[in-house]
Amino acid sequence: MDIARPKYGVYAFFINHESLILNFLNSIKDADEIILCNAGSIDNTSRMIETFISENPKVNIKVYPVYISPWRYDDIRNIGLSLVSRSIDLCICMNIEENLVPEWKTILDSYYEPGKAIYEYYVEEEKEDSVNTTTERKIHRNRGCFWKYPVYERLITEEENTLLIPHVIKKKTCWDYEHNVIGLLEQYIKEEPQSWVPLFHLARVLLDRGNHKEAHQTINRAIQLDGCDKSELYELKAKIYLSQGLSEEALHYLSRAIIYKNKFHLYIEQAKILSGVNRHLEAYVCLKKAKELLMSQIDHPSLPVSDITKLESFMEAEKELALEEMNS
């Protein structure tokens, strides 16, 4: 089995990550090759990596100093990728804030297909006393792939050939870009003036910083562009209104998002808002729609088992509250 299984290469960059580096290294040490780019670290991270290498001589770690000016995230990713040995079959792009789950290699061994270019998988992100599950596409084959765009970089491949792995592969703490994200997004917009994507990301950053007016204006600019994903944009517009405490407006834009894409997670978001304003019967109806959509895709699961369990628990709770609401 060892001869037949793929070889895995991890590549990442570090800048002053001394508080995170040991957990990161311990989670990836079973990789066949680890490429680490020192992008200007001035704390103890480098010394901690050296100590780890001396204490774990069987772990294949290579460290390279890298200087990039002006800074771009696609450049640092591409340099790391270019240093991965050609003998590696699958590349895993990482941030130091992320850890691979202990069973990561067994999972990837089970799903590996030489013809697949990109692997989509689940990531658990710890954020403010909660754990959010999202999907990510940073595992890819070691040929015909490169990163593009100065920030919120995207993996470009010769062919769109993606395999969904219905498992959590990474866990991470809340991570943000270390550099001037707004300046990099402005550069992205200059490079792709007809793309709604950098405007979408800019609106999200503005929302995180509490600049609601500018976030709305940015979303409205994106909506005017040809080929934009109106479902994504209206969903974000709903989040902006919700952060302002405007539940009705948020529900309105979630409904508009559903018109363009009938996705189960949009009904779940509606249910959360409705539950928060004690409209439990409506919340329960939304959850039923969400579950119906999920079950219709059962052969291609869109959520890990743990999230399906959470959905069912949420439904049961709203059902009880809906019955009380009707009786009162």
Image (cartoon, rainbow, N blue to C red):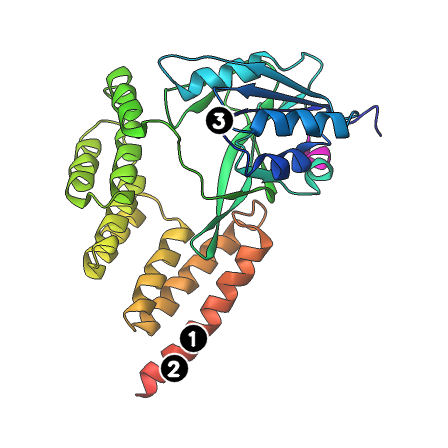
- Which of disc 1 and disc 3 is earlier in sequence? 3
Residue 327 shown in magenta: no
* Residue 272 visible to an observer of this rendering: yes
From the viewer's perspective, is 154 left or right of 53?
left
Q: Label 3: which residue?
A: 15
Name which residue type carries label 2: Leu
* Residue 157 visible to an observer of this rendering: no
The crowd level at tag 2 (other Cα within 10 Å; few <14, some 14-19, many 20+) is few
From the viewer's perspective, is 83 left or right of 323?
right
Name which residue type carries label 3: Ile
Q: Label 1: which residue?
A: 319
Q: Position of residue 87 (x, y in %)?
A: 71, 14
What span is colored magenta in the figure? 108-112
Marks 2/1 in contact by CB < 8 Å: the verdict is: yes
* Quarter where residue 18 is shown: top right
Name which residue type carries label 1: Lys
Q: Nearer the viewer, residue 167 or 259?
A: 167
SS label for mark 3: loop
Q: Position of residue 195 (x, y in %)?
A: 27, 24
